[in-house]
Amino acid sequence: MIRTLTPLALLTATGLLAQPTIPQITLNAGDQLVIDAAFPITGAGPGGNSVTWNFADPGFSSTQWTYTAIPAASAPMAADFPGSIMAFYAEIDQDFILHAFFDLANGFTDHGEHVSDGVSGMSSVNTDPMTFYTTPLLATSSGSDTYGSMEEFAGFPATLSGVHNWTVDGYGTLILPNATYTNVLRIHAQQVETLYVDLGAPFELVTSREEWWWVKAGIPLPLLVFSLETDEFGTEIGATAAMVSFSSATSIAEQAELPLRIHPNPAHDAVILELDASGTVEYRLLDAVGRQVRQGQLATGATSRHVLDVAALNPGLYHLEVRSADGIGTARLIIE
């Protein structure tokens, strides 16, 4: 089963280092998370009370994906995932588009994923959704859940079934390359699942997975996930992911969307912005890890066309945001 929804965040938090509590998880359409999908660590560290987990030294990798929250009903193949409320959209590359479906009613429950290349697609549908953990989450919480899904294996339809057991094994402070997070709970989970497929003869593959999730109140997905997976081929590090940035759409939910058009895209030396706005427009440009690399103002009125010099910026993926009294507009910009 594809395990890609394993994320983290850029908000530096403070507070007393007591036993934390994670209340109901909240997520808004438009929330964005940038995830390092190959964070280079090789262990989870100890459990216990008032622990400091220091993972600042490795630095983030170059394998980073941007997830945007959207209502599940607006995602393709939504009818295949009944019960899901929200979905995360991620364009991993031009040949791999992911929609991951879930709900947050009583914790974090995974309903499955749909991946496509823009032409054809394939769904991994959790016919029995898996609840990773329940809320409110305390330092003494634990739980268990069974799950099952419809998969595809070597071009053949397959079924997967498993059991997921979890417990909170520690709390304390988590240090990532970009920020220090206090009042963090760590979840230790174990999964055993069986993939069954008929290849002309019955075939079963049993996999064991051990995972650690670091979670914090106010951030909808884990700050860090580390997993180990074991099957008959041996033990290997599975999905290890760290949250690079988290941008909440809550503060702009009441504002109108500002039409924004940019070209060329990809750009080399300059990019043209076209927008319909009155008064002064503020803009900022963020790089792929959420760092602000440029900000300024655009005086509107006589023209709605503006040229932004990007010649000094390094090649890569950027996020452009413009704000005015009329609303907020965003766009993705690639610089070559």
Image: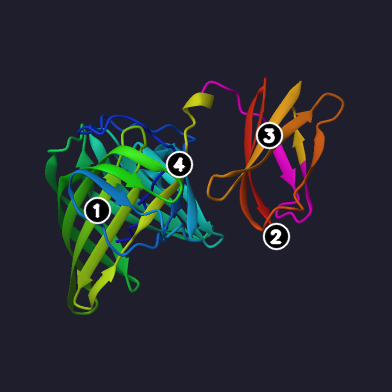
Residue 206 visible to an observer of this rendering:
yes
Label 3: state its secondary structure.
strand
Label 4: state its secondary structure.
loop
Residue 76 visible to an observer of this rendering:
no
Type of amino acid at the residue the image marks with label 1: Trp
Type of amino acid at the residue the image marks with label 4: Leu
Name the residue that disc number 4 marks.
10
> Disc 3 to disc 4, how far (Cα)?
20 Å
Circle on res. 212:
1
Name the residue that disc number 2 marks.
336
Kindly indicate the quadrant of the structure image that contains residue 157. bottom left
**Is residue 76 shown above or below 297?**
below
Residue drawn at the location 47% of the way across and 33% of the way down: 248
Name the residue that disc number 3 marks.
283
Mark 3 Cα-neighbour bin, 10 Å: few <14, some 14–19, many ≥20: some
Tell me whether circle 3 and circle 4 mark residues in contact (CB < 8 Å).
Answer: no
> Disc 3 to disc 2, how far (Cα)?
21 Å
What is the magenta range? 253-272
Type of amino acid at the residue the image marks with label 2: Glu
Residue found farthest to the right: 302
- Is 138 within the magenta? no
Mark nearest the camera among 3 and 4 is 4
Type of amino acid at the residue the image marks with label 3: Tyr
> Disc 2 to disc 4, how far (Cα)?
26 Å
